[in-house]
Image (spheres, grey):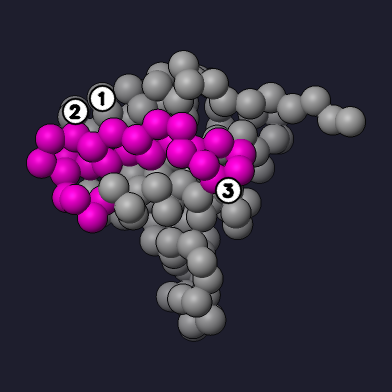
């Protein structure tokens, strides 16, 4: 048997709060989704005036990270570099999803949607930093 570290609801709330603070600091109205190591939502928040579609997109960006074990940008880059079969993947292939990694273990992911993809990723990384985690394996 293996013992693993898992995200708690309190962890997810800290991540979401820090991500929200980064978004508000920049005047960005976004949706922030935090999921566990299985890609299941723990926490989702939609800032005022964030696009409605962002609710689904943010959650899918987070899920994509967990299922692919890489940031969602890696999937976007794959498609942009001509591997169009990636468009048929059952995950979101748009930058803005980042992994939550502690001691080389993937604990979950954060997906953000609402602004430019690189800004979504910036917000996600700010949230992850709030619990002392990294975003690369």
| Residue 98 highlighted magenta (yes or no) | no
Magenta span: 28-54
Give the residue furthest to the top.
10
Tell me if 77 is positioned left or right of 54 in this view: right
Q: What element does badge 2 sit on?
A: helix
Labelled pair 2, 1 in contact (Cβ < 8 Å): yes
How far separated are the C-alphas under marks 2 and 3? Answer: 28 Å
Labelled pair 3, 1 in contact (Cβ < 8 Å): no
Q: What element does badge 1 sit on?
A: helix
Quarter of the image that includes the C terminus? top right
Q: Which residue is mark 1?
A: 21
> Which one is nearer the viewer's eye here, 48 or 131?
48
Quarter of the image that includes the N terminus? top right
| Total marks in image | 3
Residue 104's tag is: none
Q: What residue sits 23% from the left and 42% below the top?
A: 30
Position of residue 2 relative to residue 118, above or below, is above
Badge 3 density bin: few <14, some 14–19, many ≥20, Cα 10 Å? many
């Amino acid at each position: 048997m293996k013992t693993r570290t898992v995200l708690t609801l309190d962890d997810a709330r800290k991540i979401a709060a820090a991500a929200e603070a980064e978004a508000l600091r920049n005047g960005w109205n976004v949706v922030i989704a935090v999921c566990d190591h299985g890609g299941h939502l723990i926490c989702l928040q939609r800032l005022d005036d964030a696009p409605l579609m962002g609710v689904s997109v943010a959650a899918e960006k987070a899920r994509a990270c967990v299922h692919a074990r890489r940031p969602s940008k890696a999937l976007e880059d794959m498609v942009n570099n001509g591997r169009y079969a990636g468009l048929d993947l059952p995950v979101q292939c748009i930058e803005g999803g980042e992994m939550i990694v502690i001691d080389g273990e993937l604990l979950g992911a954060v997906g953000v949607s609402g602004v430019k993809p690189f800004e979504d990723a910036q917000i996600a990384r700010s949230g992850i930093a709030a619990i002392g985690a990294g975003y690369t394996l």
